[in-house]
Amino acid sequence: MSTLETTVEELKSLPPAKLAEAAGYIHKLKMASNSESRRALERAFGCLTPSEAEEMERAIASTCERIDASQW
């Protein structure tokens, strides 16, 4: 059984009050993860000079793979 399946089975056995408590905790974990991602992006935003950003764009354009959606 996967972690998700095991967790769902355990949640099914909880009384309603504890299930609500678990749901609240899961929601807090999700929101914390979203918030952490947003803060990381905000810290990184604007950290490159315009010339550094242009250099990065050139490197990405010249060395990164292109994805052809029709090949999926």
Image (cartoon, rainbow, N blue to C red):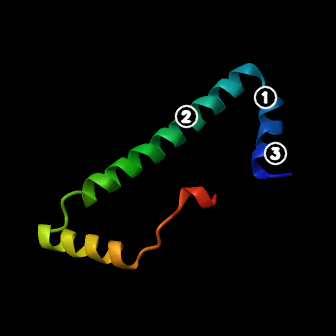
Question: Element under label 1?
Answer: loop
**Residue drawn 62% across and 61% down?**
71
CB under 8 Å between discs 1 and 3: no
Q: Answer with the quarter of the image where residue 45 lies.
A: bottom left
Q: In the shown orientation, is residue 35 left or right of residue 2?
A: left
Amino acid bearing label 2: His
From what the image shows, is residue 7 above or below residue 53? above
The CA distance from mark 1 to mark 2 is 17 Å
Residue placed at 47% from the left, 68% from the top? 66
Distance from the alpha carbon under mark 1 to that under mark 3: 13 Å
Please give left or right for residue 41 compared with residue 70 in the image. Answer: left
Give the vertical position of 66 relative to 28 (above or below): below
- Relative to residue 51, is residue 34 drawn left or right? right
Side (left or right) of 66 relative to 72: left
Q: Place residue 44 in its image quadrant.
A: bottom left
For image coordinates 77% across by 33% down, the residue present is: 11
Q: Which mark is residue 27?
A: 2
Q: Earlier in the sequence, mark 1 or mark 3?
A: 3
Q: Among all residues in the image, which is located at the extreme left?
A: 50
Residue drawn at point x = 64 percent, y = 58 percent: 72
Q: Secondary structure at mark 3?
A: helix
Q: Which residue is nearer to you in this view: 33 or 17? A: 33
Where does label 1 land, which residue? 14
x then y, percent, for residue 21: 63, 28
The local crowd at label 1, few if under 14, some if 14 to 19, many if 20 or more residues have their Cα within 10 Å, is few
The residue beneath circle 3 is 6
Q: Residues within 10 Å of mark 2 (few under 14, many from 20)?
A: few
Q: Is residue 64 above or below residue 67?
A: below
Q: Position of residue 10 (x, y in %)?
A: 81, 38
Sequence-first disc among 3 and 2: 3
Query: Of callouts 1 and 2, which one flags the residue occurring earlier in the amino acid sequence?
Result: 1
